Structure formats: C-alpha cells, structure tokens
Image (cartoon, rainbow, N blue to C red):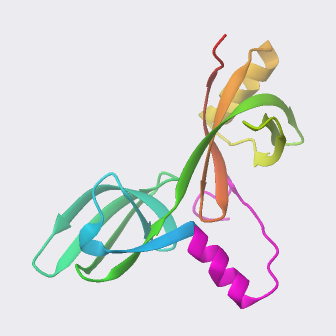
Amino acid sequence: MSDGEEFCQFVTTVRQTNKQQLSHHADSVSQALASDVKEKGYLVINGRPCKIVELSKGREKVHFIGIDVFTGKKREVTVKHDANVEVPVVDRTDYQFAYLEDGFLHLIKPDGGEKTDVRVPEGEVGSMIEEYEDSGTDAIVTVLTSMEKECAIAVKEAPK
C-alpha cells in the first residue's frame, strides 16, 4: 500500500456503468480556476485531496504546496493561472464512539444509526481510541471523508 493507505481505507462503492462512475466522481470534486484557489483551501494534487498551506502566483502560473489530508505528506504542483483544477469535497463528521471490533470502529451516527466501516487508525489517534475504550470513557471520534476515502483523524472525550 502507498500514500498512507495503511492508515485509512477506501470506501468501496459498486458501480454499474462508466456514467455512474463519472457522476460519483463529480460528487466528490468540483472544478475551479487555479487563480481562484486560496491558501487554507483544498486542491486535488496528484490525485490526492490536499489542504493548501502555501501558494505563489506568478504572471502566468500558480504554484501550490499542499498537505495530503489523509497521510500528511507534502505535495506540490504548478499550473497555469487559468487552468481548471479539481477541488475536493472534504467533510468532517463527529460520531459517538461505541466500541472496537476486529480492527474497525463502531460509531453512532448523529441520526442514531451505526457506522462500522472505519478502520482503527494506526498511530496516536488509534492508541487514544483504544485507551478510551479500555477506560470506559465516552468519546467522540472525528472522521474525515473525501474522494471515496475516509479516516478517523481525531478523538476527544465526550461532553458530560
């Protein structure tokens, strides 16, 4: 696996036709002029959703430096200022943590339903989730979703 796929899994969706694939992709990104993308905004760089941390504009080109929202890896791209670029839809959702099972989080959705398709992330966030479970402390897990991928990116103690 590459680019941090060991930390986050792809959400798989069965699609029947290329038209459905294009429609689904259109739901996860939008188009913008490179000159309209702002620092602290989002941009697809090398097929990955990135948060723009720095940009520089020349007379004809824009240079973007972004951080992959899932892996933290730095990515760069330079494009013409009037080029169409892809801007990813990035959603953050807080879920009530229920329990861990077979490497997956069991989360309670805001509507009361259960979400069971998010892997326990490696690293500090995963360790903290395990600590909350071991101690029996109620916790809130933040899941970031973008471009058919999702990952638990934060955890905190639930308000009492």
Query: Residue placed at 47% from the left, 71% from the top?
Result: 30
Residue 2's quadrant in the figure? bottom right
Question: In this orientation, does residue 66 appear?
Answer: yes
Quadrant, the N terminus: bottom right
Q: Is residue 87 part of the magenta span, yes or no?
A: no
| In the image, residue 128 above or below residue 80 | above
Q: Farthest residue in the front direction?
A: 111
Numbered label tally: 0
Query: Viewed as shown, does residue 130 lie left or right of 55?
Result: right
What are the residue bounds of the magenta stretch? 1-27
Of the 4 image quadrants, the one containing the C terminus is: top right
Position of 91 with respect to 38 (left or right) is right
Q: Residue at x 82, y 84 (%)?
A: 16
Q: Position of residue 7 (x, y in %)?
A: 66, 50
> In this rendering, does residue 70 appear at all?
no
- What's the residue at 59%, 70% (across, down)? 27
Across and down, in percent, residue 73 comes to 46, 56
The residue positioned farthest toward the bottom in the image shown:
18
Query: Quick check: is 24 in the magenta stretch?
Result: yes
Q: Is residue 30 left or right of residue 61?
A: right
Please identify the residue farthest to the right as the structure is shown.
102
Q: Is residue 24 above or below residue 49?
A: below
Please report the residue visible at 82 percent of the width from the left and 28 percent of the height from the top.
98
Name the foreground residue: 55 vs 110.
110
- When the figure is inspected, residue 127 is found, relative to residue 23, above or below; the finding is above
> In the displayed image of the protein, which residue is found farthest to the top?
160
Dividing the picture into quarters, in which one does residue 129 lie?
top right
